[in-house]
Image: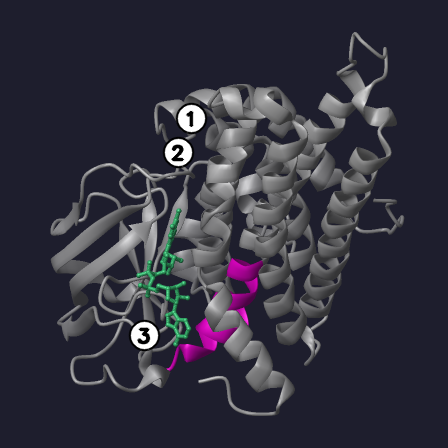
Amino acid sequence: MVEIQTASATPRIVALASEIAERVVAPLAPRTDAEARWPEEAMRALGEAGLLGLHVPRRLGGFGEGLAALAQVTEVLGRSCSSAAMCFGMHSVAAAVIAAKATPYQEERYLRPIAAGRHVTSLALSEPGTGAHFFLPRATFRREGEAYALDGAKSFVTSGAHADSYVVSAVAPGAELDPGTFTCLLVDKGAPGLEWAKPWTGVGMRGNSSRAATLKDVHVPTGNLLGHEGDQIWFVFEVVAPYFLVAMAGTYLGVAQAALDLAVEHLRNHRYEHTSERLAENAALTERVAEMWTVVERCRCLLRHAAALGDAGSPDASKALFAAKVDVADAAVSVTNTAMTLLGGRGYQENGKLARLMRDAQAAHVMSPTTHLLKRWLGRSVLGLPLL
Ligand SMILES: Cc1cc2nc3c(=O)[nH]c(=O)nc-3n(C[C@H](O)[C@H](O)[C@H](O)COP(=O)(O)OP(=O)(O)OC[C@H]3O[C@@H](n4cnc5c(N)ncnc54)[C@H](O)[C@@H]3O)c2cc1C
């Protein structure tokens, strides 16, 4: 894509992420996948470059960037390793949630260490009981003196058991049926009563460590409450959803681009002995490449447009963000499938890079907000109906 030059720091930050993606993240991606290994080195390198502080305000040492930067950084990471991009993405969403209404204590305790690359956080919203309806927690919190006590179960927590803290959603007991009572609290790694299920063994996204967790009478200081008790559905639609959508869309756009890269490389380099013709000269295959490029570039344009609307606080941002994630999920699945066809038997033969991209791409539709939910929200938005 031709870059439009702006005075923003975003291009410099994206260049920094690209350098780390190529030097550190990509070489480790096969092992991350094969061994279902949490991408510790990638997260450390991103931290040392200050990128874990992408959304931390500059006055606290971060980059103070928004959705536009997140879209591009997750794309370059997703192109190298979707697991690393996902861990970075979930960290970034959680960091944005913390930063949205951080108290002075939370700034010093969480945001400064995040900006300094010393603290990884993550998002623990999904639950086995409410599944794709990630905005309807059943975990509960209750006040006990100077602490909150949390009880409940979480599912698919990315970077589970590896991150230093988790943004956990919960409701006051008895308020489960009112979506407006969603509340977020910060739970530190190792908090007594926080127990992790066995390591994640997904079909794809295998370095993610997306584990289930149980919270049994987990006590956190009252200072770990994000925003105000019981009114934080605001977080869901103003912070969680936009950042979640952009992080996921960026990641899977990177997956689609990586599959296109592999197809181009194969068609350019593979030559038949009997005709001396490169596959790239074949008109039918050239058309497939044109179709793939168009899909990827169209998604990129929609995602960047949506992110720019989000950063500008436009009332049209949510519709564009919903559409962007749906479109990218379709693109990731279709482009990886087409690439598999174009690489012929070589692509299918081994559980190599393209197979990894295909497996990883399958998660795009089920990552929250899921494609089904987004289409419902998008349709309701266009029709002028309330989302929920
Ligand atoms: C690799 C990975 C990493 C993840 N990381 C995190 C994380 O860090 N933090 C976190 O909080 N969550 C995380 N999740 C959870 C994820 O975001 C989704 O919430 C979860 O995968 C969806 O829940 P479920 O699997 O229980 O689906 P279910 O709720 O069982 O839904 C199954 C399918 O039914 C569809 N469906 C549900 N209701 C409707 C309806 N009314 N109409 C039409 N279709 C419907 C859904 O869209 C979905 O496709 C992760 C998931 C994965 C796979």
Q: Is residue 176 left or right of residue 53?
A: left
Q: Are marks 2 and 1 in contact (CB under 8 Å)?
A: yes
Q: Residues within 10 Å of mark 2 (few under 14, many from 20)?
A: many
Residue 367: tell me if it is visible: no
Say above or below: 289 vs 133: above
Say above or below: 275 vs 72: above
Q: Secondary structure at mark 3?
A: loop
Residue in view at x 60 percent, y 40 percent: 336
Q: Determine which residue is flagged by label 1.
A: 32
Tag 1: amino acid: Thr
- Quadrant position of the C terminus in the picture: bottom left
Q: Which range is magenta?
A: 231-245
Instruction: Say if the magenta span includes residue 201.
Output: no
Q: Is residue 39 left or right of residue 190?
A: right
Residue 71: tell me if it is visible: yes
Sequence-wise first label, 2 or 1: 1
Q: Determine which residue is flagged by label 3.
A: 136
Say above or below: 365 vs 293: below
Q: Main secondary structure of the magenta part?
A: helix
Q: Secondary structure at mark 2?
A: loop
User: Image quadrant of residue 171?
Assistant: bottom left
